[in-house]
Amino acid sequence: MNGAESLVGTLLEGNVDVCFTNPGTSEMHFVAALDQYDKMRSILCLFEGCATGAADGYFRMKRTPASTLLHLGPGLANGLANLHNAKKASSGIVNIVGEHALDHIKLNAPLTSDIEGIARPVSHWVKTSKSSKDIAVDGAEAIEMANVNPGQISTLILPGDTAWNEGNAIQSINLKNKYSTVSSNLIDEALTALREAKNPLILVGGSALEEKNLIKLAKVADKIGCPMKTDWFNARLDKGAGRVNSVRIPYVVDKAVEVLKDFDSIIIIGARRPVAFFAYPNKPGVLTQETTKFIELASLSDDITSVINELSDKVGISDNKPSTVSEFKIPDIPSGPINPTSLGMVLGALIPENAIVVDESVTTGREFFYQTAGSHPHTWLNNCGGSIGFGMPVAIGAAVACPDKKVISLEGDGSAMYTVQSLWTMARENLDIVVLIFANQSYKILQGELTNVGVDNPGKSALEMLSLKDPSLDWVSVSKGMGVDAVRVDNLEDLVKNFKHGLKDKGPFLIEVMI
């Protein structure tokens, strides 16, 4: 058994049985080792950002890490943007990054780089194996670290000779994934603050957004008489009819400040203090008042479920349904022009039960979240890190993790171009994904950002940098060229007809929605 074979066997021992790959020469022994283990599902991605994003989506739905296989420093660098997003979402991933053989590194060949230095900003744990006898042991540690709650990114660097030389035995895995305990005194302090405040708020995120936890927190909020909100971006949120309607803090700074201005005490459970996504001239970065009191009741690494259980016991919640539970209310399918409002209504009417919605719709979809509150129960995944090219790769991972659920990928046309190679992987794996491309043929969000930073009269050169015309993108041709059937629609009737078709049929399907 060579080092690579011992590593693949150890990954399987640690329940890491999916590998999103984009290999090169230094990873060929790992690739060959895959033939020895038919339980390892290997999925080829044509760009490393697709592989890392897919691993993010997989963890969000499966709650166990997948692995990636990346080629040296440049391959890892190509995957950094979606590793940034994954880290912000607290997704667990085991990266396997090939390296030159140890004796070859000193020759400074063209692909030689500081792989550890590249990996550290987007990893919680980084290690280079120094011997083929160490590979399985290091792999076991990488798996253990990726499983540390709420989820971490491990990057194991695999020099070529450590993969091809004689390895060690497959290692057993000791998962140390216990959550930290929050003291009862802190829970009492938070409860006192809620009761004494004039205008308290409960701000939730992470596992507090899981359906059972959110129901209990909604009952706590009802008993105390205070609202509950979430951040604009959440890694995963179960929503729809019968579930708590989680009201998000607005993305736009002025609206967020207005929403938060009256809260004098904010209890944080699995969330972060509200801050603006960007800095703007003459606008605040902190969205709350200077006098607002914060109590950090539970972080993402804490046992949030136990905190919520104890808090609800101390409050004495009722058996009544929370006032904030969404009633089943399907929007009417509208007629008329395609616009953000009508798109949201179509989506709200047609989302199937237990669907997974991956949202990178950017400006087009800012109201979709609210228009789908009464739809069939579903799961919503947001971009927590802000790096573009998140949506379609995460949809791949979600579809691999949950093959029995329909995945809907909501994409801006500009964002989709960052990881367009995802379509090929969707076709190759026959993944059950409907992709909606909202084609406004521009970087629409940046047109608004020009105004936000004080540029009131942009000229021709500035506007050309935000336009996707001349030439215009042809998403039907692009998609079919990647093996995914596609249509273009410019009216609601055709959108509804084709969306229903995509939801009914198995496999990938793309709709270019002209706005």
Image (cartoon, rainbow, N blue to C red):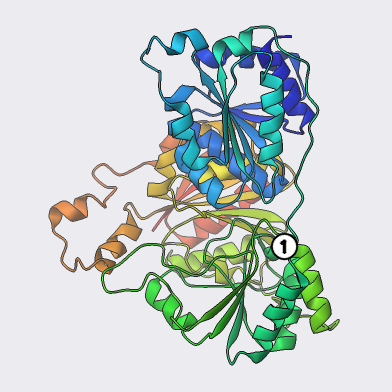
Q: Quadrant of residue 374?
A: bottom right
Give residue 360's position: percent from left, percent from top: 49, 53
Q: Nearer the viewer, residue 18 or 223?
A: 223
Image spot of residue 72 (x, y percent): 47, 22
Q: Is residue 491 above or below residue 397?
A: below
Q: Is residue 371 left or right of residue 361?
A: right
Q: Residue at x 69, y 85 (%)?
A: 192
Residue 112, located in which quarter of the rendered image? Answer: top left
**Image quadrant assignment for residue 113:** top left
Residue found farthest to the right: 319
- Residue situated in front as seen by the camera: 158 or 82: 158
Vertical comparison of 240 with 109: above or below: below
Residue 508 visible in the current orientation: no
**Horizontal and vertical percent position of residue 419:** 45, 39
Amino acid under disc 1: Glu
User: Circle 1: is it few (<14), some (14-19), or many (20+) Cα within 10 Å?
Assistant: some
Q: Position of residue 371 (x, y in %)?
A: 57, 71
How many numbered circles are shown?
1
Residue named by callout 1: 210
Q: Residue at x 78, y 16 (%)?
A: 169
Quadrant holding the N terminus: top right
Quadrant into which the C terminus falls: bottom left
Q: Is residue 162 above or below residue 129?
A: above
**Residue 441 shows in the view:** yes
